[in-house]
Amino acid sequence: MARNKIALIGAGNIGGTLAHLIGLKELGDVALFDVFGGVAAGKALDLMQSGPVDGFDSAMAGGSDYAAIAGSDVVIVTAGFPRQPGMSRDDLVAKNAGVIAQVAEGIKAHCPDAFVIVITNPLDAMVWVMQLKSGLPHNKVVGMAGVLDSARFRLFLAHEFGVSVEDVTAFVLGGHGDTMVPLTRYSTVAGIPVPDLIKMGWTTQEKIDAIVKRTANGGGEIVKLLEKGSAFYAPAASAIAMAESYLKDKKRVLPCAAYLSGQYGIDGLYIGVPVVIGAGGVERIVEIELDAAEQAAFDKSCASVRELIEASKKLVG
Ligand code: APR
């Protein structure tokens, strides 16, 4: 059986890390694309040369010709510009909407059957632009944000409780950014919900509130520290989890920016919700009942994503 083929559009910090993880996990061959074809080709060659040391045979090629992504099973998109200190993800709309529209044309022309994962920010609006401009089915176009946001939440909770990250689950809803909605009652340590852990004296509501705030600002904290560019290791790992679930038909339940057509009372919007990812792409949207406060927070998050979509429509409409 032929190896899977994964196209990475954008060969910057996240793109390079994605290619490395694909090699180490032997997920398939890689086509790296970037407007700077030399950077893509150089990284591909460098990474392929780590194969003999690490024991993988993934073929990796880089360039700036869209024809090279033909036949890809998965496309992961990071093309665009990352945040600089002082910038919000939303400030990126003007820069990145046009880039995504261009990438969507390339995907439509060369691999319209692929499963497409968008990482470029502002995420929820960029995945909307990708679907609109590529014309791919909604279940084959998703955005990576929730896996990353919940990973950050899980890490901070694990530190607070002094337990392994492996035993902490977290549940987040909504847009990627300040309006993200972490659901503490569905976040657990070995199945014990966070509100019960508060009652058990493991932590306090104040500490959980601070962790929620730190999670929502998780990307900004790193942008400030790096001074140049934004997070890339954890975003890449998160997108790989999604790609792997699709390629291996694992049917993992992962929070992703998915297209809602009536679920949660929302129609025509990409936003973060838990979904099942398998060989059919987004096979199911998990719709839970929200209490009044959670619904209000989710609605607020949807409103802010809608604003970004309206701004994107003006640019690429
Ligand atoms: N087509 C293809 N590649 C492009 C295009 C384009 N039109 N425009 C820019 N690029 C490439 C750049 O040349 C660069 O190599 O996209 C790459 C982006 O890489 P980085 O600047 O290193 O950014 P990265 O950290 O990888 O983040 C990419 O993901 O998390 C988001 O906010 C982040 O939007 C940003 C994206």
Image (spheres, rainbow, N blue to C red):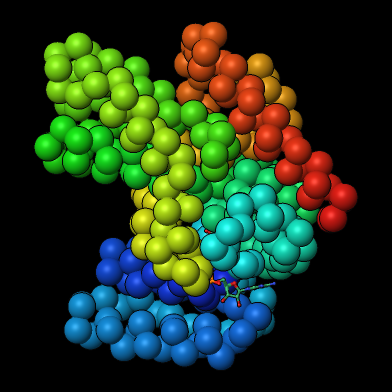
Q: Residue at x 47, y 69 (%)?
A: 227
Which of these two is toward me, 27 or 88? 88
Q: Position of residue 191 (x, y in %)?
A: 21, 21
Q: Residue at x 50, y 39 (%)?
A: 256
Up-down: is 231 above or below 214?
below
Q: As drawn, is 310 to the left or to the right of 304?
A: right
Q: Residue at x 33, y 66 (%)?
A: 21
Q: Position of residue 207 (x, y in %)?
A: 28, 29
Up-down: is 146 above or below 104?
above
Which of these two is toward me, 150 or 230? 230
Quadrant for residue 58, please give it: bottom left
Q: Quadrant of ligand 1?
A: bottom right
- Residue 216 seen in this snapshot: yes
Which of these two is toward me, 45 or 166? 166
Up-down: is 62 above or below 302?
below
Q: Position of residue 69 (x, y in %)?
A: 59, 72
Q: As drawn, is 111 to the left or to the right of 57?
A: right
Farthest residue to the top: give it.
292
- Residue 101 seen in this snapshot: no
Up-down: is 252 above or below 184?
below
Q: Residue at x 35, y 84 (%)?
A: 48
Quarter of the picture holding the N terminus: bottom left
Quadrant for residue 178, please give it: top right
